[in-house]
Image: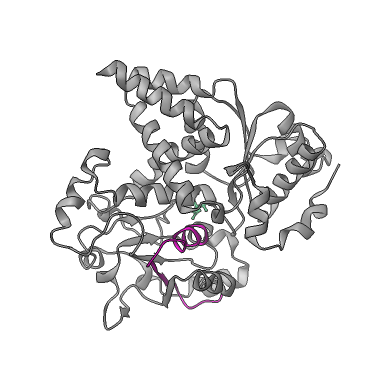
Amino acid sequence: MQEFSEFESLLCRPSSEKNLEFQRHGRLKHIIAASQLTPPLLDKLCRSAELIRRMNRHPDGNRRLRGLLAHKRAMLYFTQPSTRTFLSFMAACQILGIACNEVRDPKTSSEVKRESKMDSIRMFSSYFDVIIMRSQIADFAECCAYLMNDLERQERRSVPIINAGAGSDEHPTQALLDMYTIIRTFDFDENSDSRPSRLNALRQTYPGLTPGPSHKTYAFCGDIGRGRTVRSLATVLSQYEGVKLVFVSPQHEVLVMDDELRQRLKASGAEVHEFNSLDAELGGSSLLGQIDCLYMTRIQREHNSSDTEREISEIDLEPFRLSVERVGKLKQYTPIMHPFPRDCVVGEIPTEIDSDPRAMYFRQARNGMWARAALLVHLFDEADSLYFAYSDVNRSRV
Ligand code: NCD
């Protein structure tokens, strides 16, 4: 049986090469990295998410959805804390009729009897049809995907691996739900039922506001260095045309963007700017007034060493916190996003912002359920059955 270390030599290859191993005939086989989420694939997944969301409103749609993957079982292997990702994957499975089981505390598994992590994963693949996993070890999910590929080559049982958060590195399914939220927000097609009326009306005030994720300024604020949601979403956004990416973080070495991400984003053609306050100016005028989408994050204290904890606790975080005044400077349509949890002590988004129509974070979390259900449908190659069920249900409702 292979061990983790045996796959290490595969890790440092370019993502274009690695991503080929995470797909089969152009369809996702595993989801490990955000760079797998190309604009055409995102369009497909968001369309499916939209159908699932609409079908789920009605009992007959609900029933059809529950039949789609009722023959599948999922393992949720979450050895790092999680509320939203865990529960939204579980809810997504329930929507599709997938039975779930979970291991959240490795102390309750045979890892305490010195079973290797790779043996545990292979055991899960014996009983379940997909492994959805979160780990503090950045490369663990990727190594598990290589293990599954090896097993497939040996004509043994192999199942899809879904990376639900890997250390401070990647969180591709969060990028998926963030993109679904952005795509829904900037969908101005009145027929698409994506609740665009408020924003559509605002297009008269902002004639430059175009549909879709392209040609927009996205600002990320908070812990840029260790926020895996930031890394993953920025990677996806950098594939769209005319995108400006602005990063606002305290000037501490662990909190600013790392050079690898900076170089990668610039190489993809995105315009990248970095600031140390939300009150900064970009091109001579207020940054806040130029942002089309604001993505707030918390300081990831759990990664701090005791020295870093002391240094960070001395930093004034006020320039990285929203206030009614700062929100007042944003465009009237700018969605305020946050992957959550927010830090209720630091208060990067005070609760008084929650009633602002631009506060998108609770909707964003709910979108995770639809987007993750769409991902499962795609992984199991049931998108055609979904479209068929959708038109069937719609026909019978007319
Ligand atoms: C994020 C995570 O776990 O990376 N949360 C999430 O999945 N919704 C963000 C965070 O923990 O700050």
Magenta residues, as a range? 231-253
* For residue 29, above or below residue 236: above
> 230 or 235, which is in the foreground?
235
Residue farthest to the right, as pictured: 1
> 173 or 377, which is in the foreground?
377
Name the spot of residue 126 as percent of width and height, x first: 74, 29
Residue 235 within the magenta-colored segment of the rendering: yes
Quarter holding the N terminus is top right
Left or right relative to 72: residue 197: left
* For residue 184, above or below residue 108: below
Residue farthest to the bottom, as pictured: 284
Name the spot of residue 336 as percent of width and height, x first: 32, 57
Q: Quadrant of residue 117?
A: top right
Residue 136 in view (yes/no) = no
Q: Residue at x 30, y 50 (%)?
A: 185
Left or right relative to 323: residue 165: right
